Image (spheres, grey):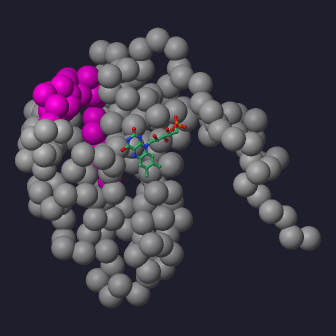
């Protein structure tokens, strides 16, 4: 065995979505985020396009990003559905979260590789990033709701017109117990052809 598989499988199963509301005040260090990003960079990539791009927000820039998200929510939600608490949640998240990473896909100029494969490569990169966070005991939340796919965020992130934002990853230390996960058994999801 080349690696400690017991540890690796435990790490994979232990990765959890942890929301900013569950973060404690302890801050994640920049060096830890750098290691997460380096792991992300080793995702598989068809045609070596390496389409993952990361825009890392903290401090006042994170507050600014959260204000943009709140404004998008306000401006795209019908008045009868608008909730004050949801609008203010973004500002609260800015205070709770150490870093938010906007995960983006840089579209290949020639478009030779199908877009879905570039999206999948970025998703693999995100998994690498989240597993590295898990190894530190750091929680992550991959958010795709509330305006993540909007033109306004696209423009704010300075993306090319064929590029895409695929989500915001919130990063922070959880308070209290590390949550337990839940999955249906694998056997119901596999067919073997032998
Ligand atoms: C592509 C993607 C997008 C997601 N977007 C959201 C989201 O917008 N809101 C949310 O609450 N969870 C989101 N999640 C996280 C899932 O809710 C979470 O993975 C699921 O509940 C399983 O929990 P676990 O990650 O702790 O195993 C997303 C996950 C993926 C893979």
Q: Quadrant of ligand 1?
A: top left
Is 119 colored magenta in this rendering?
no
Is 89 colored magenta in this rendering?
yes
Q: Tell which of 38 and 191 is nearer to you.
A: 191
Residue 15 falls left or right of residue 145: right
Q: Report x, y in % for residue 143.
A: 34, 44
Q: Tell which of 85 and 179 is nearer to you.
A: 85
Q: Could one spot residue 163 in this view of the protein?
A: yes
Q: Report x, y in % for residue 2.
A: 77, 48
Image-quadrant location for residue 18: top left
Give the residue displayed 26% in from the left and 69% down from the top: 163
Image quadrant holding the C terminus, namely bottom right
Give the residues in magenta. Answer: 82-103
Residue 135 falls left or right of residue 33: right
Q: Report x, y in % for residue 45.
A: 49, 69
Q: Tell which of 15 and 148 is nearer to you.
A: 148
Give the residue displayed 31% in from the left and 74% down from the top: 107
Q: Is residue 160 above or below residue 155?
A: below
Q: Could one spot residue 66 in this view of the protein?
A: no
Residue 128 falls left or right of residue 88: right
Give the residue displayed 42% in from the left and 66% down from the top: 119
Q: Residue furthest front?
A: 80
Give the residue displayed 43% in from the left and 60% down from the top: 122
Q: Tell which of 74 and 166 is nearer to you.
A: 74
């Amino acid at each position: 065995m080349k690696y400690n598989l017991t540890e690796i499988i435990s790490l994979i199963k232990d990765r959890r979505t942890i929301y900013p509301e569950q973060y404690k005040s302890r801050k994640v260090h920049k060096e830890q985020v750098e290691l997460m990003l380096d792991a992300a960079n080793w995702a598989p990539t068809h045609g070596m396009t390496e389409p993952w791009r990361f825009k890392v927000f903290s401090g006042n820039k994170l507050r600014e990003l959260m204000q943009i998200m709140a404004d998008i929510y306000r401006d795209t939600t019908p008045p009868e559905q608008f909730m004050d608490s949801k609008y203010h949640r973004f500002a609260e998240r800015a205070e709770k979260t150490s870093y938010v990473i906007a995960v983006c896909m840089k579209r290949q100029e020639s478009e030779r590789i199908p877009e879905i494969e570039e999206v999948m490569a970025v998703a693999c990169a995100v998994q690498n990033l989240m597993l590295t966070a898990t190894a530190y005991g750091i929680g992550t939340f991959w958010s795709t709701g509330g305006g993540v796919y909007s033109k306004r965020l696209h423009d704010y992130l300075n993306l090319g017109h064929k590029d895409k934002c695929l989500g915001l990853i919130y990063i922070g230390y959880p308070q209290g117990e590390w949550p337990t996960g839940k999955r249906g058994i694998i056997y119901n999801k596999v067919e073997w052809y032998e």
